[in-house]
Image: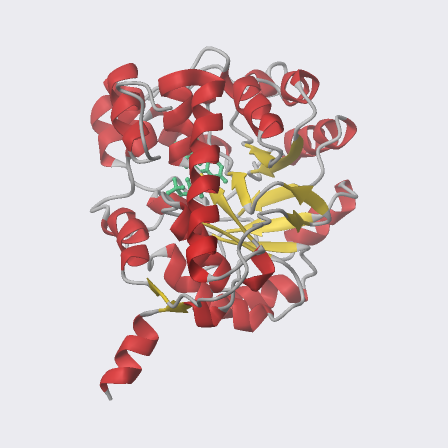
Amino acid sequence: MIMEGEPVNVKEFQELARQALPKMYYDYYTGGAEDQYTLKENVEAFHRITLRPRVLVDVSRIDLSTTVLGYRVSAPIMIAPTAMHKLAHPEGEVATARAAAACNTIMLLSFISTCTVEEVASSCNAIRFFQLYVYKRRDVCAQLVQRAERKGYKGIVLTVDTPRLGRREADIKNKMVAPRLKNFEGLLSTEVDDDEGSKLEAFAKETVDDALSWRDLGWLRSITNLPILIKWVLTREDAIKAVEVGVDGIIVSNHGARQLDYTPASISVLEEVVPAVGEKVPVLFDGGVRRGKDVFKALALGAQAVLVGRPVVYGLAAKGEYGIKRVIEMLKDELELTMALSGCSSVKDITRSHIRTERERLQSML
Ligand SMILES: Cc1cc2nc3c(=O)[nH]c(=O)nc-3n(C[C@H](O)[C@H](O)[C@H](O)COP(=O)(O)O)c2cc1C
Ligand SMILES: CC(C)CC(=O)C(=O)O
């Protein structure tokens, strides 16, 4: 039963988060880069994909479960790495991990977390991957990767879209602060003395290694035995390179439109990247997922699972661990209903022919 005032879909958590958060933090979580063209497109491009359901299929039992890099999850819906959860809720990433465990899914812990790798690991038995930014201080990165490996994280997600931080104008106006990042205590100062604009941008500028290149995948391999996924692949050219250098998985993502504005909507990139990758490595996807139907569409385009960014943070800000659980459950319920009404009783039944994209619409006009 839905209580009065309870959200009935994931989108309604955004307003609850706005009410719960100081403006500076809400703007940080919500915002995209510059004109926010891609931010809008990430969501709207889903609306241009329609469904091609089949009937008279036995859908009396629907199985949402799947595997990601060999790990069984209850549904193809995972938690994207997003920074600084303590700005949203005092329990921070520990609450997020507990929600992931309760939903039987995978959490990707951000490199820029406000709880430590160890605190998150000891809080519950969620399957966790660790997201990495490569800093000029490679020794700090190596220590964090090794700490994550020791604490049972199952994969490293290398985010490669941030040689500089994207220009997020609300953060500049708000003079966004960078809080204490406990993971770096004793390793790296997170103090920045820049009064001009976003302190986060100044912090990124000071720390991130903007000389990082494909060659450095060899370095990462040399410091960990964990599978390596690469996050932010938006072209067939980079997809092919990523496979050539031997990554174990690809995440199609435009960083929730926070980095390079005017990249295409993330969902529209799958049609280019999936055929280039073939079956060589799994392709995951994020950007703009707000409905179970969006998960269905991403799967139809060849993604193995999706990651959810902002809705998870909004759930956390509004209602803590319970809020995140509700966000994931809502997406799962909507996916289940979409599958039932489309004639798919398991995720492997969802195929390219269950959707119609712009490509087919244009072809039908010729
Ligand atoms: C507030 C916020 C912080 C983020 N922090 C990180 C991060 O630390 N590392 C990373 O790889 N991606 C980060 N991302 C990008 C997400 O992992 C993901 O790509 C994006 O949020 C997906 O889009 P969505 O928010 O529309 O679901 C962040 C996104 C947001 C909204
Ligand atoms: C501090 C930032 C690098 C975290 C991030 O990835 C983001 O805000 O999108």
Q: Considering the image in quadrants, where does the N terminus appear?
A: top left
Q: Residue furthest top?
A: 90
Residue drawn where x is 57% and y is 44% of the image: 75
Please indicate, yes or no, whether residue 359 appears anywhere in the rendered image: yes
**Camera-side residue: 26 or 125?**
125
Q: Quadrant of ligand 2?
A: top left
How many numbered badges does the structure rendering display?
0
Please indicate, yes or no, whether residue 175 appears anywhere in the rendered image: no
* Drawn side of residue 144 relative to residue 350, left or right: right
Residue 169 vertical position relative to residue 214 in the rendered view, above or below: above
Residue 184 vertical position relative to residue 42 in the rendered view, above or below: above
Residue 155 horizontal/vertical position (percent): 69, 41
Residue 87 vertical position relative to residue 228 in the rendered view, above or below: above
Residue 307 horizontal/vertical position (percent): 49, 43
* Drawn side of residue 103 relative to residue 53, left or right: right
Residue drawn where x is 30% and y is 49% of the image: 43
Residue 257 horizontal/vertical position (percent): 34, 46
Q: Considering the image in quadrants, where does the C terminus appear?
A: bottom left
Residue 185 horizontal/vertical position (percent): 60, 15
Q: Residue furthest bottom?
A: 366
| Coloring basis for residues | secondary structure
Residue drawn where x is 27% and y is 18% of the image: 4
